[in-house]
Image: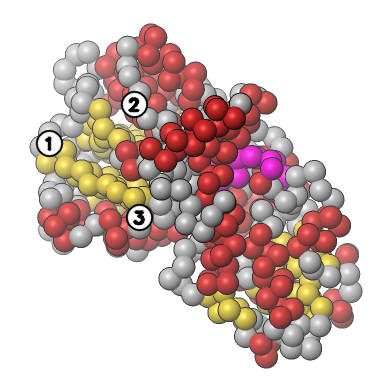
Amino acid sequence: MCGIVGVISSTPVNQLIYDALLLLQHRGQDAAGIVTMQGTKCFMHKARGMVRDVFRTRNMRALPGNVGLGQVRYPTAGNAYSEEEAQPFYVNAPYGIVLVHNGNLTNAQALKQELFDVDRRHINTESDTEVLINVLAHELERSGRTLPLTPDQVFEAVAAVHRRVKGSYAVVALIAGHGLLAFRDPYGIRPLCFGEGEGSGDGGREIMVASESVALEGTGHRLTRDVAPGEAIFIDEAGRLHSRQCAAAPTLNPCIFEFVYLARPDSVLDGISVYHARLNLGESLAQRLISTMPPSAIDVVIPIPESSRPSAMQLAHRIGKPYREGFVKNRYVGRTFIMPGQAVRKKSVRQKLNAIGMEFKGRNVLLVDDSIVRGTTSREIVQMAREAGANKVYLASAAPPVRHPNVYGIDMPTKEELIAHGRSIEEIRQYIGADALIYQDVDAMKRAVGALNKSLAGFEASCFDGRYITGDVTASDFAALQAQRRLQFDLVDGGDDGPGRSRLALQGAAEGAEERA
């Protein structure tokens, strides 16, 4: 669950990448990084924190060049507190390659061992991105033994990557002295698109690749199209774009949680307007509500800001009830869903939202949320509505119950963290404290979003339906994720301040666990 961007231009790109990362900040707030390239020399700056905090004027001045890439990180694999695992990643051979990645590799551990035993490459972190860049580097070395490196050789290397790597991945990479490469996994799970613009008015061609269309539009580029699943595009130093389908049997199955929550509503992903998708989810949820309880029991519909607003508005319109803003959001507090650790999230809810008492007092209120994952936020918000004077508090979710872990780059990797896992709707309602709880139906959700693009083969919706589309996910994979999760986040939940957020702190935690075992 990260945001990535790459640009090749006729003018310096440092400021352009910075602006694009600001537009993608919602996809990750843990770390940020930019690499630019001048000739064959790379210039990099990355650190933990949000974009505006990571990059100062001195950092931007040290990033010359007309080609570059960047990433905002939310860690769903590897070490969440390691600055070394912030992206981009760099390898010096062959050519010199820099890479950013959005997604999760499901066979990262097996690949790591294979890289060491067979490819003779060393991996120094727990990041699956480092695994991915080394696989790409090895395959480029095999395919590009003759100079100069040609687009055909690049595409041959990407095809080999597709054969070796499993999971979800949208990738942007720079190959020193040759150009910019972008590709997407054969299922198209994580989003990736590209567009063109004019290089600062000098008439030169400028091409940008990004996770969401909003990054293109917000920086003055025209959306050309999405990168197809399994497709690779290569832009050489002259600005010529080459593309090829590199996967044997690609199918378009985008992650449906992008439309539910992750993406900005003004983005278009795989031909689907995120805003329109959320309107459709509201329409479908309204039908579900009508079949569950009488709308006459509801006085007012109030969204839980912000991604639920389109669904809440459409639901209110459908049932003929007034729509009101009942919570004011503090925009200087980050997204609680992507905050590691329950204690941090719980504390942030009250900082993030404040109730407008007059909209709740004496009323039967229907709160609408985009999804309910851990239940912590929902429980706090229901309590806030009661404290504000609500007579009855009903809660509706525009997404179905999240019952299964996600292994493709969304922060819900273990079943123990999911409020809906192993619980009935009634048990969830009691935990949250609502007077009624209405969930979206899984099939209805898929129909609501899928109606906007009939060419989709389906959706990656494993957290809702338990179907892991890559077909390689096993019980041992979940056990490994759970162990990693426990190592990194247990201390966060145990105190207000959390761990020392360093590799040493985590190593100490690991040693303590070994002693207790």
Q: Report the amino acid beneath label 2.
A: Asn
**Mark 1 or 2, nearer chain start:** 1
Q: Quadrant of residue 197?
A: bottom left
Q: Quadrant of residue 119?
A: top left
Which type of secondary structure does the marked residue at label 3 adopt? Answer: loop
**Mark 1 or 3, nearer chain start:** 1
Q: Is residue 376 left or right of residue 306?
A: right
Please name the residue shown 48% across and 46% down the image: 1
Outermost residue on the bottom side: it is 358
How crowded pointer 3 is (Cα within 10 Å; few <14, some 14-19, many 20+) is rated as some
Q: Which residue is mark 1?
A: 41
Residue 290 in the image: state x and y as whole percent. 85, 68
Q: Report the amino acid beneath label 1.
A: Lys
Please name the residue shown 42% across and 30% down the image: 126
Task: Name the one closer to the observer, 174 or 61.
Answer: 61
Query: Which region of the structure is painted magenta?
Result: 402-416
Residue 475 against residue 428 in the figure, above or below: above
Visible residue check, residue 260: yes
The reply to whether dot 1 and dot 3 touch (C-beta < 8 Å) is: no
Please name the residue shown 54% across and 27% down the image: 514
Separation (CA) of disc 1 from disc 3: 26 Å
Residue 341 against residue 516 in the figure, above or below: below
Visible residue check, residue 447: no
Residue 174 in the image: state x and y as whole percent. 25, 36
Residue 294 in the image: state x and y as whole percent. 89, 74
Separation (CA) of disc 1 from disc 2: 23 Å
Q: Report the amino acid beneath label 3.
A: Gly
Q: Which residue is mark 2?
A: 124
Residue 499 in the image: state x and y as whole percent. 46, 48
Which type of secondary structure does the marked residue at label 1 adopt? Answer: strand
